[in-house]
Image (tube, rainbow, N blue to C red):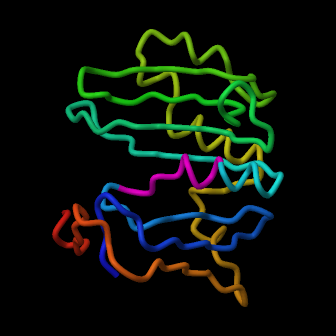
Amino acid sequence: MPLTSVERRRYLFIPTRSDWTVFLDNGHQGTDAFSPLSYMAEKLSCEAVRATCAPGTRESSDLAVIWELYGPEVIDFSNTVRAVFVADDGNGLVFSESGEVQPYEDMGKYSSRLKRDRFTPQILDHYLRAVGIEAFDETFYQPEGQAAILVEKLGPIAPASREFQLADLR
């Protein structure tokens, strides 16, 4: 299955050993989760979580550790309940936290001298486990006897879209 730019055409829903379901799309730069997850949380009256973990290295600029919690109610202009992230925006590391602090958060970490230490993959794992998601445990996904669901958009593709094979992007 090819990956695409501009227009996502395939969406995969994977069951887990919990009440959570994994959502992935075929974007060539990774899943663009904000719009679909915030929309589903609102329409299905549930919570949704966006989690990104690209730990990078001390020498590289690909660091991104992101936690976003969406709820069913729109507050102001969004249904984002809480967002915490550290990422390289191309000009260096940026750390941000906004929204309603959750009881499992370690607020003391957010004032660490080094931005990369304020929100680490280990902290992300702690937050995910606090809501019942064992993202870094491969046995958490697709329990025996449960099938994943692939939703595919058929028909013409957006004119500016390109398709890539995974090998082309490595």
Q: Residue 164 in the image: state x and y as whole percent.
A: 22, 71
Placement of 107 over or under 66, stated as above or below: above
Residue at image position (51%, 40%) is 121
Dividing the picture into quadrants, the one containing residue 137 is: bottom right
Total count of labels: 0
Q: Residue 91 in the image: state x and y as whole percent.
A: 24, 21
Decide which of 29, 36 is in the foreground and name it.
36
Decide which of 159, 142 is in the foreground and name it.
159
Residue at image position (69%, 56%) is 40
Extreme left residue here? 168
Q: Residue 41 in the image: state x and y as whole percent.
A: 73, 51
Q: Is residue 10 left or right of residue 99?
A: left
Magenta residue check for 7:
no
Magenta residue check for 37:
yes
Placement of 170 over or under 61, stated as above or below: below
Residue range corresponding to the magenta coloring? 30-38
Placement of 46 over or under 59, stated as above or below: below
Q: Residue 127 in the image: state x and y as whole percent.
A: 68, 39
Quadrant position of the N terminus in the picture: bottom left
Quadrant position of the C terminus in the picture: bottom left
